[in-house]
Image: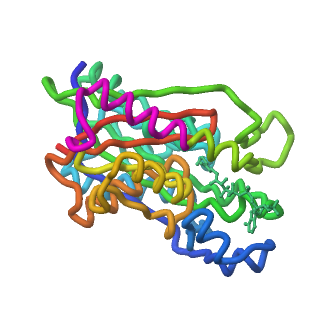
Amino acid sequence: MNGIKIRGTGRCVPEHIVTNDDMAKIVETNDEWITTRTGIQHRHHCTTESHTFLCVNAAKSALEKAGVTPDEIGACIVATVTGDNIVPSAACMLQKELGLPEDIPCFDLNAACTGFLFALHTMECLLNASPRKFGLVVGAEVLSRTINWADRGTCILFGDGAGAAVVECREGWPSISAVMGSRGDDELLRLPGIETGERGFISMEGTKVFKFAVEAVPACMDAVLKKTGKTVEDVDFFVFHQANARIIDLAVRKYHIPPEKYYKNISEYGNTAAASIPLVLSELQDQGRIGPGSRMLVVGFGGGLTWGSALIEFA
Ligand code: UT7
């Protein structure tokens, strides 16, 4: 299979910032607890912005940076669990707004916080079967719609945002070698659907999910390094899903990753689920810390349960 590489990234976050002190006005919590237990200081919540608005702006920016026009796109995937509608999908709304071609698949993918990673792998498969060689992969969430404001264990965690990547597939490029896993579980982490008649609040057994995450992250990383025959030293940048700064710190310590090779933006955005990895990629590109030739090891984990990792290069 021919591999994909990233051509350009973009992002969009809503304007309204909710601080930890704002949270303390709603539930019994405080800045010190949230900062030390999670690393989160702010999160952005939509007020007037829609999910589609976030996707469109992130995607436009990624297309511009990639120097790719909408008519060159061969598939569009939006990883999300919080689209404006179930039908039409967020990806079809994006197609409409951007004027993407009609003879391509546009669809949403639900793998919760691992969604962007699953979408990258899916895109690699799709582009191998497409006459067009560019794909649009977006991770976007408006998790503020799903917050249970009476649950201090979860309401302080989540933020809204979108990140996008335009990828290219070329003959001879190495596959991103994605390693992915799933374990059906509706007890540890759940966001009810419409059939249940329940209001769609996220619920989570935080400590159990934390334990799952700290086991899944190194297992994924080891599997990708083994699959690609690379070592930690061969990786230019480690991009972790931003669920809790402590989960990232544990991985960083285990693999002796130096500070210049990983990044945390959870203090600014909180946990944005499928958007978190592309938000990191986009900030890193804008800061000039990743660019042409960079090799990134990307790691995701979350609801489903789902987990995964891949080694992706910048074109
Ligand atoms: O993105 C998808 C994957 N998600 C994750 O990976 C999230 C993984 N889990 C976590 O990040 C952490 O488990 C949390 C940040 C959600 C919670 O941290 P924790 O260290 O596991 O705390 P805990 O739930 O065990 O709660 C410890 C204490 C409890 O009080 P008692 O029973 O010890 O008296 C909680 O009631 O902290 C209390 N607590 C709070 N206190 C102040 C829980 N939430 C809060 C809060 N403010 N917001």
For image coordinates 68% across by 79% down, the residue present is 22
- Which of the 4 image quarters holds residue 133? top left
What colour-coding does the image apply?
rainbow
The foreground one among 48 and 226 is 226
Identified at 79% across, 72% down, the residue is 27
**Dominant secondary-structure state across the stretch colored magenta:** helix
Q: From which residue to which does the magenta span run?
A: 214-234
- Please indicate whether residue 153 sits to the left or right of residue 9 in the image: right
x, y percent for residue 160 = 56, 60
Is 71 in the magenta? no
Regarding residue 24, the answer to whether it shows in the image is: yes
Front residue of this view, candidates 133 and 279 = 279
Judge whether residue 72 can be spotted in this image: no
- Comparing 136 with 115, the one in front is 115
Quadrant where the N terminus sits is top left
Q: Position of residue 83 (x, y in %)?
A: 59, 47
Quarter occupied by the C terminus: top left
Quarter of the image where one finds residue 134: top left
274 lies above or below 269: above
State the residue lying farthest toward the right: 197
Residue nearest the viewer, comparing 276 with 93: 276
Ligand 1 - quadrant of the structure image: bottom right
The structure residue drawn at horizontal position 25% and vertical position 56%, both measured from the top left corner, is 64
Above or below, comparing residue 229 to residue 37 in the picture: above
Q: Where's residue 18, x and y in %? A: 62, 75
- Residue 35 x %, y %: 59, 71
